[in-house]
Image: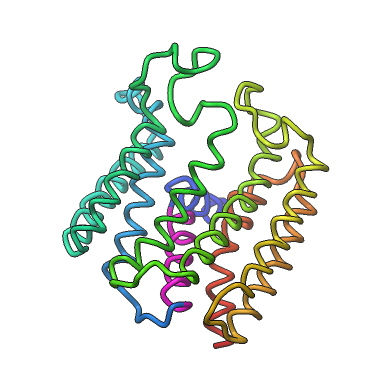
Amino acid sequence: MDVFKRILNFYINSSIHVALAVYALTWLTLIQFGLDYDKNVLYFVFFATVTGYNFVKYFGVAKFHHRSLASWLKVIQVFSFIAFIAMCNYAYKLQFNTLLILSIFGLITFLYAIPLMPMRYFRDSQKNLRQIGGLKIYVIAIVWTYTTVFLPLMDNDIDINTDVVVTSLQRFIFVIVLMLPFEIRDLNYDSLKLATIPQKIGIKKTKIIGVLLLMVFFMLDYFKDKLDGYTILSTLIITFITLLFIIFSNKNQSKYYSAFWVESLPIVWLVILLMIS
């Protein structure tokens, strides 16, 4: 049991789980727009997510404690370097225009972890994008939306139309909702300067917002020009499952409630769609 727990912790801490979630949402987009399985895009997204998340999470730790890093963190560093090499390999196979836009989001990820701007631009001497009050959840949602919707469609030469815009809005809302249990969990740890949604309006109102956003998320399906029963049913099922996770989230939730189960919802959504279609 102890070995299994260590493996699970490494799986989560090394960002493999979140990378699979982003991979799942990207594949979901390909299916929804009738596109074939795109190995180059999907593998790039997976390895880029591992690289980006581990850079953001561990940059501050590694730069000050490089020689005294815990063994598990050293393994994650090596794993992240391998993921970076794999990311570069698949990036080489993407279209130039796709890479051009990706560079912008790469810069956002860089600024999310590293303080390059003068402190006077940030309230309370905050140093990077991650620490600007109220911004974190929206930065993550924008990056996920581009990565999982626009990137695969652009690389497959799909024009931006009404369905793409609606799908991107759905994806943005879905990611925002997924972040709410994390923000509720972190009430015990986050500085008040971060101004997260639960900090500003409380847990109860945060859950109400989550429920309302899920209603909008589901109803947006009916604004698409091309729609099939499989898509509607999969959206309905994942909306209901996500709703339950929002309702039962609390600041004393178990270690794996958000980090594993909530993060699994994109994967569950993909599996549902693959099964019913």
- Left or right of residue 135: residue 201: right
Whether residue 25 is in magenta: the answer is yes
Q: Is residue 94 visible?
A: yes
Q: Residue 42: percent from the left, percent from the top? A: 34, 66
Whether residue 248 is in magenta: the answer is no
Q: Which one is in front, 1 or 8?
A: 8
119 to 52, vertically: above or below: above
Magenta span: predominant SS is helix
At horizontal 43% and vertical 66% (from top left) the residue drawn is 26
Residue 193: quarter of image:
top right
Q: Magenta segment, which residues?
A: 16-32
At horizontal 48% and vertical 77% (from top left) the residue drawn is 32
33 to 73, vertically: above or below: below
Q: Residue 69: percent from the left, percent from the top? A: 36, 29
187 to 179, vertically: above or below: above
At horizontal 76% and vertical 56% (from top left) the residue drawn is 211
Q: Residue 76: percent from the left, percent from the top? A: 36, 43
Q: Residue 168: percent from the left, percent from the top? A: 50, 61
